Image (tube, grey):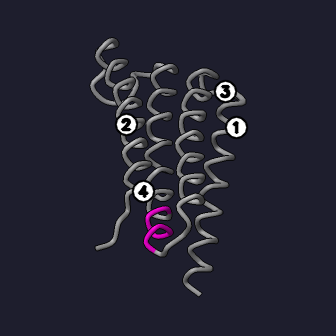
């Protein structure tokens, strides 16, 4: 049986982050009595984008992490990349919300680190396949 405990750990942490971001959207919509969308509220749009952005990047990164783990990449590397992913997504969410949709160092750093993790995992998986 294949063990994928490392991906399970970071998948679980990312899932909790996605739920926290979703909760922020639900809290906004209930407070503003908005059923769908943001009702034109910019603060609501930022919360929706913070959640959506996590949904856009996390699955790809976790799939790549899972494949790398199945292919026997070192646990140290997997933990470094998984930890960096979780840190990057938290940093991005804080930066996007804190910057109210504008520039914020957390948003920039979180995006850059997320992309770096995805690129590293993509290259590792391509090399493993060759």
Disc nearest the viewer among 2 and 3: 2
Q: Using a 10 Å C-alpha cutoff, classify the residue at mark 3 as few (fewer than 14 neighbours), some (14 to 19) or many (20 or more).
A: few
- In the rendered image of this protein, does residue 28 appear above or below residue 14? above
Relative to the observer, which residue lies in front, 7 or 123? Answer: 7
Of labels 1 and 3, earlier in sequence is 3
C-alpha separation, residue under disc 3 versus residue under disc 4 = 32 Å
Using residue 21 as the reference point, say whether residue 114 is left or right of it: right
Q: Is residue 68 left or right of residue 3?
A: right
Which residue is drawn at the image coordinates 60% and 46% (left, top)? 84
Residues at circles 2 and 3 in contact by the CB criterion of under 8 Å: no
For numbered disc 1, what is the local secondary structure? Answer: helix
Judging by the rendered image, the residue that carries numbered circle 1 is: 108
* Residue hosting label 2: 16
Residue 87: percent from left, percent from top: 57, 39
- Look at mark 3 in the image and give the residue it sits on: 102
Q: Which residues are magenta?
A: 65-70
Q: Residue at x 39, y 38 (%)?
A: 18
Q: Earlier in the sequence, mark 2 or mark 3?
A: 2
Labels 2 and 4: the sequence-earlier one: 4
Which quadrant would residue 16 be assigned to in this image? Answer: top left
Question: Could you say which is closer to the camera, residue 56 or residue 75?
Answer: 75
Of helix, strand and loop, which one carries label 4? helix
Element at label 2: helix
Dot 1 and dot 2 residues touching (CB under 8 Å): no
Give the spatial CA distance, label 1 vs label 2.
Answer: 22 Å
- Mostly what secondary structure, the magenta segment? helix
Which residue is the site of mark 4? 7
Q: Distance of mark 4 from mark 1, alpha carbons?
A: 25 Å
Front position among marks 4 and 1: 4
């Amino acid at each position: 049986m294949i063990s994928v405990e490392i991906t399970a750990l970071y998948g679980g942490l990312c899932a909790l982050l996605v739920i926290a971001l979703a909760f922020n959207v639900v809290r906004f919509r209930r407070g503003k009595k908005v059923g769908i969308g943001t009702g034109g509220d910019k603060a609501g749009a930022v919360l929706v984008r913070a959640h959506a952005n996590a949904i856009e990047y996390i699955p790809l990164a976790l799939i790549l992490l899972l494949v790398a783990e199945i292919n026997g990449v070192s646990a140290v590397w997997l933990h470094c990349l998984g930890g960096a992913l979780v840190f990057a997504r938290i940093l991005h969410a804080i930066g996007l919300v804190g910057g109210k949709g504008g520039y914020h160092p957390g948003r920039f750093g979180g995006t850059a680190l997320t992309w770096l993790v995805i690129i590293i995992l993509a290259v590792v998986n391509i090399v493993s396949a060759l």
